[in-house]
Amino acid sequence: MPHQQHTINVVSLVTAICTILWFAVYTWLHHYTFADDAFIFFRYADNIVAGNGPVFNHGERVEGFTSPLWLGILTLCQLLDINILHAATIIGMLLGIGAILLVLTFPGLNSSPVLRAIASATICVQPWFMFWVTSGMETMLFTFLALFAVHVYLSEKQTDKSHFISGGLIALTILTRPEGVFLAPLLFLGMPNSKKKGFLEGLLPLILAYQIFRMTYFNSLVPNTATAKIMLDSNHLEMGRRYVLQFFANVPISLVGFLPAIFAFFPRIHNCNHEQKLIRTLHVTLLIFIVYFLTIGGDFFQYHRFFVPLFPWFVLLSTYAIHHLIALVRTNRMKWIVYIATATIFLLLLIPSLNQSLVRRQYGIDWIVASGKLGNALRLQYPENTLIAAPHIGALGYYSKLPMLDMLGLTDKHIANSTPNPEVYREYPQKDVGHERFDIEYALSRKPRIFVPINGFTSVPATHISEVPVRFAMEHVLINRMNSHPEYQLTNIPVENNFYWIVLEKKHIRNPL
């Protein structure tokens, strides 16, 4: 027994060291590969530190961020005079490492240390998963907290301790991503009545406190991002179906995570009574998340963002299933056959998700860099009260420091509550997920000085409005409207040598360089 425990400790220690080194190397190679929306958090944090409050534009109280907790962490770093871009990258790395260590030590699901090591390696070699480590978004925080909350919950369950701490961690998970709320009911129903009070005492104060703040400061029951993005209709159900199927087609190894359902729902196959409730809870939770993804139409971002927090659970359940399938085999010869067959199937299922180089440049990084450079150019060339209208307000807004009209409504309440035009957005189905609400006439009534198309950067100056690339239905409508609008003309803003951004600018008011 001591020898077996020593082996377990060595395998876990080696895996942990390799994980830390791998995440450090990956982060070094991919620093500053942020998602554009990360810069929305950065600008909010800047405004808080500057004394303007949690606003994107000075004086406009709109909750245009998804994660209050992530914003709070970044703001704290800013207050401590830590470079916010560095902080977002390093914290993402530490949270990723923490998530892997939780997979290694996760209680309640019996599997071997070797299988846990393989599970950790499986997560680390997923390019789509690793992207979110350095994205600057709250995804890694949500992934870590969801694992940590359940980890603590299971540890508390084995003792006489109340579930106060796990309740608090669930509250933090909800404040990181709204869908964290899906974890609370299932854990609450699975605990004895004597511990439910402690769980609620940990959960409710933080949630209620922020909800009161949201209602008093932002004058809203839900974040503006949810109002702008979420639509419940048949079109989104179809887009959600494609989103979910695309994930499982690209990452089929996740399907192995549903194998433990055989044991949990058919206990005669294997005696695992003490684990049945946990397995059922995890499977039901995963299915609830998937149904949610189906309902809202999936996600606009590349790299399976919504599935990132679920993937460690798929992998954990996979290790449990493989461990117990092998345990069912009685003879050593058959065990070897099962080992080889399992390893072969595992590798075959793993290959489709490895079709991207681990050191490739981030999808869209050139566009984000170009947006940041345009922001700098606008800040230098235009007065500080110049209103810019654009569908991408992240890097552009952060570096320009100018007032921004978000034409897709994340930071604008009117657009977030506008009625989408289903006939238009069906022309751009998956690209317009969460971007269907826009109001061109309202945008024109705000009299922005410049409209910035999302893909307007070029090395050759444009000569006609038809040369402006169209990516969203909103831009399709905007370009058609501008064809007959006398106030705006095509302008090529020089960003650097042989680099321009095509914009639509009000006539006769541009300041020359």
Image (cartoon, rainbow, N blue to C red):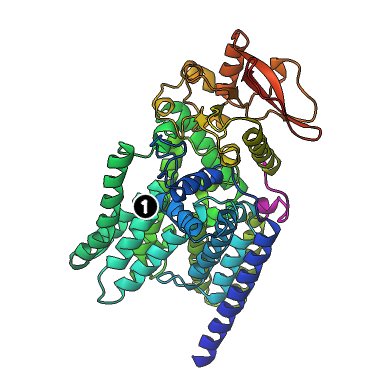
Q: Main secondary structure of the magenta part?
A: loop
Relative side of 191 to 447, left or right: left
Q: Farthest residue in the bottom direction?
A: 2
Q: Nearer the viewer, residue 56 or 293?
A: 56
User: Looking at the picture, how far across and down is residue 473, in whole percent?
Assistant: 56, 22
Relative side of 353 to 88, left or right: right
* Residue 459 falls within the magenta-colored stretch: no
Relative side of 388 to 380, left or right: left
Relative side of 184 to 28, left or right: left
Label 1 sits on what residue type?
Answer: Ile
Give the crowd class for mark 1: few <14, some 14-19, many >=20 residues within 10 Å. Answer: many
**Quarter in which the C terminus is drawn:** top right
User: Looking at the picture, how far across and down is residue 445, in whole percent?
Assistant: 47, 16
- Residue annotated with mark 1: 174
Helix, strand or loop at label 1? It is helix
User: Looking at the picture, how far across and down is residue 40, in whole percent?
Assistant: 52, 42
Residue 444 seen in render: yes
Residue 258 seen in render: no
For the point 25% across and 76% down, the residue is 160
Is 93 located above or below residue 11 in the figure? above
* Residue 356 falls within the magenta-colored stretch: yes
User: Looking at the picture, how far across and down is residue 96, in whole percent?
Assistant: 55, 62
Q: Which residues are magenta?
A: 351-364
Q: Nearer the viewer, residue 69 or 247?
A: 69
For the point 48% across and 73% down, the residue is 105
Please identify the quarter of the rendering in which residue 512 is found: top right
For the point 54% across and 83% down, the residue is 9
Q: How many marks?
A: 1
Q: Nearer the viewer, residue 442 or 322?
A: 442
